[in-house]
Image: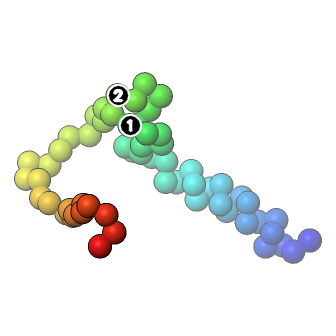
C-alpha cells in the first residue's frame, strides 16, 4: 500500500480538529437548540464587509 494513503486519513482528521475551536458554528444556528448564541463580544466599530444583491431572477 502507498505510504501516502496510510498517512492521509490521519492528516485529514488532525486538520479538521484544528479548525473546530473557539466560536465555531458546527451546525445551523450554532448548536442543537438552534439558538444562534455566541459568547464572543462584537467589536466597538462594526464595518460592512460584503453585500448580496438580489434580483428578480437570472440577470
Q: Residue furthest right?
A: 1
Q: Residues within 10 Å of mark 1 (few under 14, many from 20)?
A: few
Q: Is residue 15 above or below residue 58?
A: above
Q: Considering only order in the chain, which callout, 1 or 2, is on the residue closer to the N terminus?
A: 1
Q: Position of residue 2 (x, y in %)?
A: 87, 74
Q: Which residue is mark 1?
A: 29
Q: Is residue 18 above or below residue 25?
A: below
Element on which disc 2 rests: loop
Q: Residue at x 56, y 50 (%)?
A: 17
Q: Position of residue 40 (x, y in %)?
A: 26, 40
Of the 4 image quadrants, the one containing the N terminus is bottom right
Nearer the observer, 33 or 46: 33
Q: Residue at x 81, y 69 (%)?
A: 5
Determine the image quadrant of residue 3: bottom right
Query: Is 15 on the left-hand or right-hand side of 41?
Result: right
Query: Is 18 on the left-hand or right-hand side of 56?
Result: right
Q: Position of residue 49 (x, y in %)?
A: 19, 63
Task: Measure how far apart labels 2 and 1 are at the Cα level.
Answer: 6 Å
Q: Residue at x 20, y 40 (%)?
A: 41
Nearer the observer, 51 or 25: 51
Circles 2 and 1: CB atoms closer than 8 Å: yes
Query: Is 3 on the left-hand or right-hand side of 28?
Result: right
Label annotation for residue 8: none
Q: Which residue is mark 2?
A: 35
Q: Residue at x 73, y 60 (%)?
A: 9
Amino acid at each position: 500500500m502507498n505510504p501516502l494513503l496510510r498517512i492521509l486519513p490521519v492528516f485529514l482528521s488532525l486538520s479538521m480538529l484544528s479548525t473546530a475551536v473557539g466560536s465555531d458554528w458546527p451546525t445551523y444556528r450554532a448548536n442543537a437548540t438552534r439558538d444562534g448564541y455566541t459568547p464572543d463580544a462584537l467589536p466597538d466599530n462594526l464595518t460592512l464587509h460584503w453585500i448580496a444583491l438580489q434580483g428578480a431572477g437570472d440577470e
